[in-house]
Image (tube, rainbow, N blue to C red):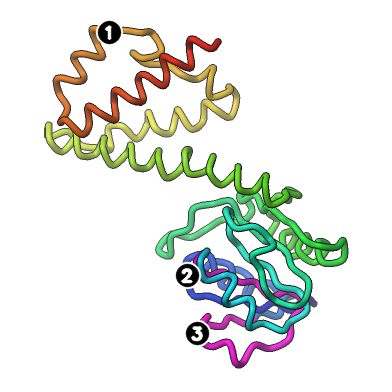
Amino acid sequence: MISVVIIGSGNVATHLAATFLKVDTIAMTQINSRNLNSIPPADVTIIAVSDNAISEVSSKITNSFVVHTSGSVTMDALKNTGSKGVFYPLQSFSKEKTVDFTQIPFCLEAENKDDLSKLETLVSVLNGKIYHINSEQRKSIHVAAVFVNNFTNHMYTIADDICKQYDVPFEILTPLIEETSLKIKNLSPKEAQTGPAKRNDTETIQNHLNLLSRAQQDIYLKITQSILDYGKKL
């Protein structure tokens, strides 16, 4: 039996707590970050709060082993007096959507092997995939994740606006989105790149620009130029 305290009430904390509660070999307690006066002892204390609150929250914790769940904050940001670590699930979390932790990579970091073993145990009961990643690597993964997730989703938002403007259902693009996601499991992103920018099809590019607002044109042109510039490096 491994005891866990989760501090926080956001998306990551909520999903981790709900999942740990279902595991017989984990004794789990969840605490709101505003109520730090009643933290029980635990093998692993997980801080799942906003990045800018990690240092302050951790400084008030006396438990022996404390980790945070951030992708962009170093392990040294933890200000507890005991051992430190990182338990970063590389996924986008929304409270209203169920998470399958068996499909999530966990980036782990700890100051010693015994504590790292505790984190590995937590991932193993979730059937997740373990990556031993240091703070510098994790920051690079986080910015890469912003490109593939947050920026990509913003492109979906723009595409949705264009569809609405021309009275086309956004769902017509869903098979294309799914095919692109599946394709990069077998091809590198570079090999999977297609489209008018890849072909340097200036006529199609101009036709697209004629359909777009000024703000959409700016984004379209910057990404098109980036694809063209990348092609020149090859």
Three-letter code, disc 2? Gly
Return the disc, 2 or 3, that comes first in the chain's sequence: 2
Q: Residues within 10 Å of mark 1 (few under 14, many from 20)?
A: few
In the figure, is residue 166 to the left or right of 198?
Answer: left
Q: What x and y, as percent, mark residue 228?
A: 41, 14
Residue, far right: 113
Residue at which label 3 appears: 34
Disc number placed over residue 202 in the picture, else none: 1
- What segment is highlighted magenta in the picture? 29-50
Rounded to the nearest whole Å, what is the CA distance between mark 2 and mark 3?
Answer: 13 Å
Q: Residues within 10 Å of mark 3 (few under 14, many from 20)?
A: few
Residue at which label 2 appears: 10
Return the disc, 3 or 1, that comes first in the chain's sequence: 3
The mark lying in front, picked from 2 and 1, is: 1
Between 148 and 25, the residue placed more toward the observer is: 148
**What residue appears at the point 57 percent right and 53 percent down from the top-left corner?**
72
**What residue appears at the point 48 percent right and 38 percent down from the top-left corner?**
148
The mark lying in front, picked from 2 and 3, is: 3
